[in-house]
Image: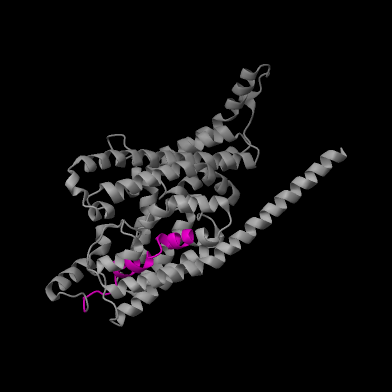
Amino acid sequence: MTSVIRHSLTILFPFVLMDVLLSWIDEAWLRPDGFYYQIFQFKRAGNALIETGYSLSDLVIMLNVVVSICAAYLVGYYYAEFFHKDKMTTGLASGAAYIILNYDYRSPDNLFLFDNFGLRALFLAFVTGIIVGLIFRIPFSNHFSSHQVVTEDDRLFSRSQRMFFPLAIVIILFVGIGFSLSLVTAAGPLGILNEGIATITLGKATTHVFAILASAVISNLLMFFGLASPIAQPRLTGFTTYSGANYQFSQAHHTSFGAPYPITLHTLYDVFGNISGVGGMLALMIAILLVGIVHRERRVAYRGLLPTLSNMSGIGLVGLPMIFNSIYLLPMLIVPVFNMLVGAVLIKSRIIPPAVYRIPWTTPGILQGYAGTGGDIATLIVAIILFLLDIIFFIPFVKNGNRLQALLITRERNHKTETGRDQNDQ
């Protein structure tokens, strides 16, 4: 099953690369709340950049739809190929099923649940493709395709007739699931997941260190499976209500030392959990560029470096890939937790102040603490040290990946050699 998803991600990568690059330009460069927009003071350029950003945002939404439909199609396609079934029809049915599942049955305007498309919902597309593949594996009667096959058109017609019953089951099943979910929530299947996780891991516990650490672990596990987390940036405003009290305190006392809520999602997860990028992705990419020997991974790291610096990890997730890649799962979970533990100890010890200022979510992780504290040098030094430690921590795992790749290459060469000998003997 993992090979089916890996093959799908490989074919999907060019679409994801385009999607993430355009999203990065839009969010970081063309939005008034973007990091580079504010740094380079693009406000002087007038509204032209903002209008361009709106158009680019619409294009990103369309690409998100394409990415999800293609992901469902590819998983269904390769799943059917693995079991020697009709891969083209299975793939098409998978893409159609995903569209049906994410139709807004509550809307009178015939809209779709666009928040359920894109990289944030790849797992949902994977599951859709697998379910459709399972349905198409069911042996149905060939009564409708029992006519004599003489020409190529006859063969195609016979094949299409065999697909009628599984296709009907797919449509009925996914309409039923989509409609049932619409009775529970207006946010669709992904909305139910995010709301449930947010309620369990966040709620009123966002000032507790271990609750935030648990939320970070769950967030990165979701990323490993191809799902977005409710605590990942940009986050809903309701999850950062403590930041307002901290900000008011800093304005009244001209310091953030002694803030009423020194431990929050913002002061820990945003500032320390993302120092090396989401899930340590930026540190991993730099480690790959330093010691990696896999040409494909190095090219992905080069292409994804700048967007990942702005907390957009999609290129690495799909290109390396990180999704369903057990080699990097352990550091992906440990690195953010380690960084946040260090941050919590330093904040509690009043060695560094908590970040109280609101900053653009596209701010590089290594600078979020510095910007969020109003320019505290100690926080910046800590961030740099942690970032270097994260890179060092990833290096053994990258080397392990190198060894596995070398073994695969050797095995492939031996297989080709044996195949060539067998052909010569014949």
Residue drawn 50% across and 56% down?
322
Please tell me whether residue 351 belongs to the stretch shown in magenta. no
Residue drawn 43% across and 69% down?
388
Q: Is residue 395 above or below residue 51?
A: below
Left or right, 281 with respect to 252, comes to right
- Between 223 and 247, the residue placed more toward the observer is 247
Residue drawn 53% across and 53% down?
297
Q: Position of residue 23 (x, y in %)?
A: 35, 46
Query: Furthest residue to the bottom?
Result: 349
Query: Furthest residue to the top?
Result: 150
The stretch in magenta equals 258-286
- Between 303 and 58, the residue placed more toward the observer is 303
Q: Position of residue 75 (x, y in %)?
A: 54, 43
Left or right, 83 with respect to 341, comes to right
Left or right, 204 with respect to 396, comes to left
Tell me how the rendering is colored: one colour
Q: Does the image show residue 181? A: no
Q: Position of residue 153 (x, y in %)?
A: 61, 18
Q: Is residue 305 above or below residue 212?
A: above
Q: Is residue 60 above or below residue 407?
A: above
The picture quadrant where one finds residue 377 is bottom left
- Between 171 and 55, the residue placed more toward the observer is 55
